[in-house]
Each structure stands twice: as C-alpha cells, then as structure tokens.
Amino acid sequence: MLPRTNLLKPIPSKAAVYDQLVSEYGEKFSEEAAQYAIDNLVADWNANALAKAEDYAKTMQMSKAAIYDQLISEYGEKFTPEEAQYAVDNVEADWKANALAKAESYQETMSMFPGAIYDQLVSEYGEKFTAEEAQYAIDNMS
C-alpha cells in the first residue's frame, strides 16, 4: 500500500493526475501502473477543486459559471461535475467585485464602451457573469 501523505499544496483532479502519469511527455507510466496509483492515492478531490476555484476567483476574477466550466473542461482541470459543483458552491468570492474588475480591465485595455462590456460580461462565450453582477460592474466602473 502507498503511504498516506498530507499534501500541503492541492493537487489537480484525478483525471489530470492519471493523464500526467501516462503521458509520453509526462511520467510515461503504463496505464495499469497509473490506475493502481490513482486507486491508492489518498486525496480530497473536492478540496482540490475548491482550492482551484478560489485561485481562479482571486487571481483571474472569473465568474462562478466560468470557474465551473474551467474545472470540468477536458482542456482545463478535468474535475468531475460533482467536484466542480462542490467547489463553486463553497468558494468564498465576491462575484460582483470580480465582474467589476473584468469590466474595468476591458475598459482600460480595449477601450470598450459600457454596452459592449456588459455584453461580454454576460456572454456564454465570454465571462458568464449573471445579469445582476454585470449591471453592478457597469454601474460602478470608474
């Protein structure tokens, strides 16, 4: 049996760990060896997803919906939908402040007008903030 460790730094999702173990650009373990490691790894995947969500909220000022999508993305963190939902349900973030930070960034770096910023903030292809969060941002931009 593998030793139990108390990891101080959150590790990625189960799928991301597995992919790194079997990758020809990563650890190059066999699928069997990687699966054995995953099956015997002691980790709190919900806590790991939550740590990632908090990082995205604080450092990238992402919306709740955008964080969820990033956490479950096959090109992102590869957490399960349940782990991602746990994370966004439990992350402590000020979503209105995040929307405001994004709005001000668009205004400063792209010289966008408020209407265009609002559209970007609420777009399913953009930032995915709620209408209330986006309106707060527009109303409070400097």
Image (cartoon, rainbow, N blue to C red):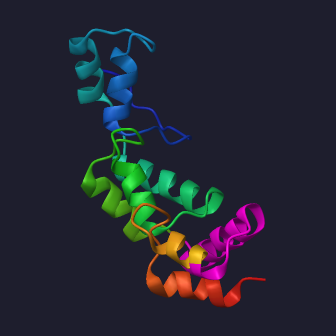
Q: How many marks?
A: 0
Q: Is residue 80 left or right of residue 107?
A: left
Q: Is residue 37 left or right of residue 49?
A: left
Q: Is residue 94 visible?
A: no
**If the image is split into quadrants, where does the N terminus sit?**
top left
Residue 15 lies within the magenta run: no
Magenta span: 92-115
Q: Residue at x 55, y 56 (%)?
A: 56
Q: Nearer the viewer, residue 9 or 107?
A: 107
Q: Is residue 34 left or right of residue 69?
A: left
Point out residue 61 in the picture as x, y percentages from the top left corner: 60, 64
Point out residue 11 in the picture as x, y percentages from the top left corner: 47, 38
Point out residue 60 in the picture as x, y percentages from the top left corner: 61, 57
Q: Nearer the viewer, residue 40 or 11?
A: 11
Residue 110 lies within the magenta run: yes
Identify the main secondary structure in magenta. helix
Return the residue found at the far bottom. Answer: 139
Q: Is residue 99 visible?
A: yes
Q: Residue at x 48, y 87 (%)?
A: 132
Figure check: 142 above or below 34: below
Q: Nearer the viewer, residue 134 or 46?
A: 134
**If the image is split into quadrants, where does the C terminus sit?**
bottom right
Q: Residue at x 28, y 27 (%)?
A: 38
Figure check: 96 above or below 50: below
Q: Residue at x 41, y 42 (%)?
A: 77
Point out residue 17 in the picture as x, y percentages from the top left corner: 38, 29
Tell me where residue 55 sits by quadrant.
Answer: bottom right
Figure check: 105 above or below 35: below
